[in-house]
Amino acid sequence: MRFSFDELYENAERKQSQNTSSSDSDYELDGEFTYIGDPSDGIQLKLPKLYHSSKNDGQGEEQGFSSGDTISLEDVVEPEIVSMLSNLNITLERNALPHLTTRGHENKALGPVLIDEAELYYQEKKDLIDEVEQHTFPMQDQVLESVWNEEIDSIEKVNQRLIKSIKDKKKREEEARIQKECEAEKRRQEELKHKKEMEKKLKEEEKRKIQEMAEKEKKAEEAKRVEALKKKQEQEQLERNKLKQSKESTNFKLIEETFTKYKTMIQTIKTEIIEPVKADPTLKKTLAQHKRKINPKFGQLTNSTAQLNAITNELTELVLQTKANQLAYKWILNFIAKAIVSQAESEARVKPESALPLGTLALSLLASYPELKEFLLARLIKKCPFVIGYTCSIDTVEGRTRMGWKRQSDNRWEEDISYDERMGGMITLFAVITRLPLPQTYIQKLVHPFPISWSWRMLARIGNTPKDLLTNTHFVVLAYWWEAAAAQLLQAYNVQATKLLEVISIDLTALVADKKFVGAARLRIINEEWHNTNQISSFPDMAA
């Protein structure tokens, strides 16, 4: 045969073999299959037989289908084969063919058993050919051969189309499977992509939040900086206003009242403290012993911090021993105040840096014994009224006495240079006390007794002193103060301190240019050095 149904019939045989495997022993006879055609003719179809045998009553007789049994081609043949066979186009008259029966099988009761339609069709075709050969049908052999070949070709074509159709179906199924897998892979990739995009989005969102937080913190810091700058500007404006007010309206009457108050206090100390102690021999003797111990201590001060601490501890203990007796306590404080001012008056006038250990000692004692403040202030104002910006005319004896001038043994007033140096020494002590911080143990407990604002107030009042009251001593005092505390005033008041320093060193000196004060010239030189070096020198720190 030039083509085969094996490829198409493979599944059908497999199904048939599965269905009949349990009863293969029943089909050992040659009648297991029905064969259509002869291999020698070029075509033969192998079909399951259309009947079965069974034993009845032990007699072993073959029985066919009952009259009610109907077997069709579709019951035993694959649908594709049925469809192919139904398309055969050999047109022969069925009544012209001899009656066909199954080979070697006949039921006596029912007669010949009808064969399958496909077998009948093929048998009819073959019988027709036999009859043609036997009766010399008027058709030449080559015509018959041609017809036969055409039919065979037609079957081949149908067979090929059927095979192609099945292959195309399998191909479509495979393509559908591949497409389904591709779609599944595509969905997986899309899900993976979506997951990555979400992760990226979350990271970007987190990054954005971090940036927003950083930006928010930056803005908050900027707002704080702006607020601090604003407060600083407001403070500077406030200081400018204070400076302006002090320049325009220094209350000289209030200064006079303060001066009078502390001059009066000196008299009160004499009558209420010094005189009563003198009247008590025992107390006088005890305090005299304290006086002899205290007095040398101020002369022992050096630039050594260790030495300063030792002296401070000794003086503190001596004062503490008198605290139980209020009269003795006040007397000892008054004596210490006089000793501090006297030491500045004698030593700081020629060696201004010595005011640093002296001022440190004074501030420590002020922190330990706050009552010392009034005594020290009274002694300073009595000898150097410049510390509160007080000025009066020195054309009279009363005026010179008020301004702290001393008379010599011959009853003449001391020399101007001596006076200026004494005032300078005491101003230096005052300036150092205002620029020093409180001892560490007292910073959180006490208010500074003489803060840097006292220096500001003194400068402003001297700067507003009427021209006719200004003397050389005013500028000497300002120069001494400058070297002791100008650098610290700049740190405290910045721009406003700069303006105040310009006022006292430029404007005020220009006001008395016609008088050619030596002190004013020195102050202008100090100002020039400041601008040339862009810094203000100060006393060196104390050594350990």
Image: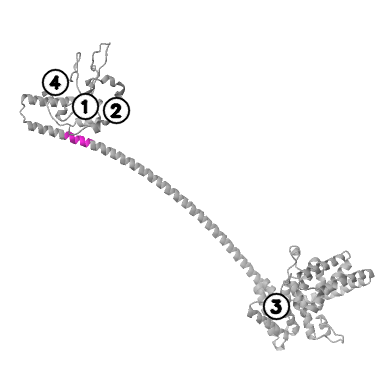
* Disc 2: which residue: 15
Counting residues from the N terminus, which is met first, the one under dot 2 or under dot 4? Answer: 2
In-front residue for pair 470/451: 451
Instruction: Answer left or right for 58 relative to 317.
Output: left
Picture residue at 22% right of the left edge, 26% below the top: 47
* Disc 4: which residue: 99
The amino acid on which the numbered mark 1 sits, given as a three-letter code, is Lys
Which label was assigned to residue 247?
Answer: 3
* Inter-mark Cα distance, 2 to 3: 125 Å
Q: Quadrant of residue 355?
A: bottom right
Given contact means CB atoms under 8 Å apart, are the residues at marks 2 and 1 in contact?
A: no
Name the front one of labels 2 and 4: 2
The amino acid on which the numbered mark 3 sits, given as a three-letter code, is Lys
Q: Quadrant of residue 334?
A: bottom right
Counting residues from the N terminus, which is met first, the one under dot 4 or under dot 1? Answer: 1
Query: In the rendered structure, which segment of residues is drawn in magenta?
Result: 154-162
Q: Is residue 357 visible?
A: yes
Name the front one of labels 4 and 1: 1
Provide residue 188's location: percent of width, then percent of height.
Answer: 40, 45
The amino acid on which the numbered mark 4 sits, given as a three-letter code, is His
* Dot 3: element: helix
